[in-house]
Amino acid sequence: MSEKLKPETLCVQAGWQPKKGEPRVLPIYQSTTFKYDTSEQMARLFDLEDSGYFYTRLQNPTNDAVAAKITALEGGVAGMLTSSGQAANFYAIFNICQAGDHFVCSSALYGGTFNLFAVTMKKLGIEVTFVNPDAPDEEISAAFRPNTKLLFGETISNPSLEVLDIEKFARIAHHHGVPLLVDNTFPTPINCRPFEWGADVVIHSTTKYMDGHATAVGGCIVDSGNFDWDAYAEKFPGLCTPDESYHGLTYTKAFGKGAYITKATAQLMRDLGSIQSPQNAFLLNIGLETLHLRMKQHCSNAQTIAEFLESDDRVAWVNYCGLPDNKYYALAQKYMPNGSCGVISFGLKGGRERSIRFMDHIKLITIVTHVADARTCVLHPASHTHRQMTDEQLLEAGVRPDLIRLSVGIENVEDLLNDIKQALEV
Ligand SMILES: *Cc1c(COP(=O)(O)O)cnc(C)c1O
């Protein structure tokens, strides 16, 4: 499908293009396996000489159609779905890093990603250095080593809501001859397309806005096709030298711009198997069909609520990059001028106890450990995800004891405001 189509059209139409007599709606190919007529046909698939389906752990038509839709939305050349956002981040890095390698990462990061990078990948012999994303170029550059293979950041970090200076990060990564990988979960390609600013690979937890209804955990990796792996072949032997597990095939030579995703599919998915189920991909596709409509409503509701909270004198502070006095307002205006995301954090005067009282009195808004779905929800990290920590430990971890994370949904904003107002009154 033409890349010239606008995002709204891609949300609805990209990915599945039925031929004559085929289902109009993307079918769920609920089949582990696919049929061939000759032994030779099957052999050619195993050697990556033909493309086609043979076993769902490697590829499935439902998943491929949905990956193609997300790839079109991001403006990339190839994409793959994974079982979760965690799996997507792991595969995206493990595809170009092995034991003995190193990468540099923004410290403004989702907690699960932090654990994956700092603890689990370390056990595999891959080291990470975290950098303050707002530091000057030279300070971030100083973290690079000869064995550094990539730079990583989140376009809007979860939960600290810091906006990444994508152009700056791309400049630093490319100066060191490595790609920039960004997790674009919070803005989605509706609000921000990191490839247009120099990012090389984009990762999503599709569990959040893309699915949008809290029905299916999933992830996605999209390659821009822009990074010239062969220009730094000594850094990326997995892509630029023969793969013995495919009879000596070299991914960059055989697949060109598709090398990175083909390797992730043919090697990592084959061996590690974190596939998305076709059933979940089907649900994800239905979510994507309305992503453009929902993002607009999430952002306008969040903007209204953030402005109300900022104006209320019972509220101690509000963090939302759509507010002009926010530290990241200018970056948000540059990279996501039509809106950022629906997640706000704020604190109430009266600290932890007051925040707990607020949480106990909201009615329409519910307490759940989730963000970015159609229903407005809240979480108080000090009494939930971080409840074992003292106020001092919380502050050290960058989580204020009074912090309430509000994920604004797509309901009527007056109803949401009324719920917040009555809970503040208690
Ligand atoms: C939720 C989230 C993840 C992890 O995704 P799962 O689908 O829960 O595995 C990664 N990055 C960001 C920014 C997230 O919000």
Image: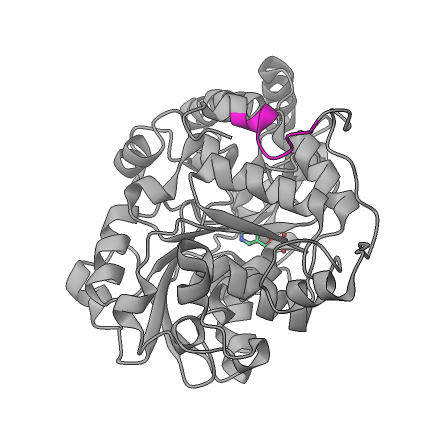
Q: Tell me which residue sits at (50%, 80%) in the image.
A: 122
**x%, y% of residue 281?**
71, 43
Front-most of residues 114 and 325: 114
- Residue lying at the far left of the rendered structure: 138
Q: The C terminus appears in which quarter of the rendering?
A: top right
| Residue 324 appears left or right of 349 | left
Q: Tell me which residue sits at (71%, 54%) in the image.
A: 53
Front-most of residues 377 and 285: 285
Q: Main secondary structure of the magenta part?
A: loop
In the rendered view, tell whether residue 57 sits above or below residue 1. Answer: below
Quadrant of the image occupied by residue 54 = bottom right
In the rendered view, tell whether residue 387 sits above or below residue 161. Answer: below
Front-most of residues 97 and 48: 48
**x%, y% of residue 105?**
37, 64
The answer to whether residue 141 is seen in the rendering is yes
**x%, y% of residue 5?**
45, 23
**x%, y% of residue 361?**
70, 32
In the rendered view, tell whether residue 141 sits above or below residue 26. Answer: below
Q: Tell me which residue sits at (50%, 65%) in the image.
A: 114
| Residue 189 appears left or right of 406 | left
Give the total of numbered labels: 0
Q: Tell me which residue sits at (42%, 35%) in the image.
A: 320
Quadrant of the image occupied by residue 333 = top left
The answer to whether residue 347 is seen in the rendering is no
Highlighted magenta segment, given as a residue range: 10-19
